[in-house]
Image (cartoon, rainbow, N blue to C red):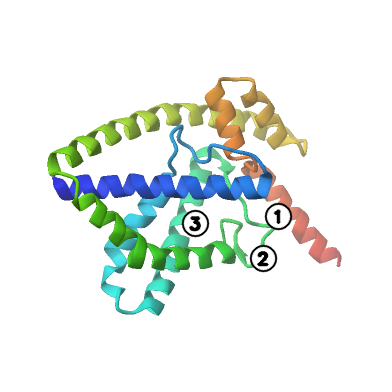
Amino acid sequence: MEKVSMFFILFMIYAFCGWLMEVIVTIIHDHKLVNRGFLIGPYCPIYGYGFLLLYFLLNRYLSDPIILFIMAILICSILEYLTSLILEKIFNARWWDYSNRKFNINGRICITNMIAFGVLGCLILYIINPFFIKTLSYIPNLILNILAIILFIIYMTDNIISINIIKSFKGELKEAEKDQTEEISKKIKSILSQKSILHKRLVKAFPHIKTTKEVLKELQKKIEEKINK
């Protein structure tokens, strides 16, 4: 029970750290504060899942930092790619798109992120995680379990509420797919921005959301430009 509690708390810590990192990057890039991610709370679960994968799959490679660096890139890149693909299949939308960046794969992952994954993976397994585990070891087991239960209830409640909000995105995206104009994303954002504050938050969190039709149109346009050159 104590191990389960510790790993769930670590999951939440890394989910928060990932959220914080994305918020800071958004502030630097867009000069504004945005609550990033699908969930209402200050955490991005993909970073928590990424940590768990790195911890359980790469602990055996701690003696070889080069292999660990490469494996961290592979694991995190596959996770990001599959997450993008699954979300697109479910919601008919591309929630992030790296098509304009060099050395990207289908706009789902790109070389800059991949290198960052490798660096972060090494930092986490060699420095950050040992510090967190040592810190958590000082907390009595009873308090650790209670804290984990409280965080789990908050996390699951957030998931339920957020999934219901995201479902409305799917409905609006289906309606937007009927539109033949080039302003599909603007139409979606305009509709959703008129709803609750939680809908507005999701629009701000993913300002570059595109329907599948938009992605295909952009791809077709690029192909035509290359042919005409």
Mark 1 closeness class: few <14, some 14–19, many ≥20 residues within 10 Å: some
Residue drawn at the location 52% of the way across and 38% of the way down: 91
Q: Is residue 135 above or below residue 206?
A: below
In front: label 1 or label 2? 2
Q: Is residue 166 above or below residue 208?
A: above
Horizontal and vertical percent position of residue 162: 44, 30
Q: Is residue 133 left or right of residue 69?
A: left
Horizontal and vertical percent position of residue 6: 22, 48
In front: label 3 or label 2? 2
Nearer the N terminus, badge 3 or badge 2?
3
In front: label 1 or label 3? 3
Q: Which residue is mark 3?
A: 81
Question: Identity of the amino acid at label 2?
Answer: Lys
Mark 1 and mark 3 residues within 8 Å of each other at the beta carbon: no
Q: Secondary structure at mark 3?
A: helix
Residue drawn at the location 26% of the way across and 72% of the way down: 60
Q: Secondary structure at mark 2?
A: loop
Placement of the N terminus among the 4 image quadrants: top left
Nearer the N terminus, badge 1 or badge 3?
3
Nearer the N terminus, badge 1 or badge 2?
2
Q: Which residue is mark 1?
A: 219
Horizontal and vertical percent position of residue 189: 66, 31
Question: Identity of the amino acid at label 1?
Answer: Leu
As drawn, the label of residue 203 is none
Q: Is residue 229 above or below residue 195?
A: below
As drawn, the label of residue 102 is 2
Q: CA distance from mark 3 to mark 2?
A: 16 Å
Residue drawn at the location 40% of the way across and 46% of the way down: 15
Q: Nearer the viewer, residue 10 or 186?
A: 10
Q: CA distance from mark 1 to mark 2?
A: 15 Å
Horizontal and vertical percent position of residue 166: 50, 31
Question: Identity of the amino acid at label 3?
Answer: Tyr
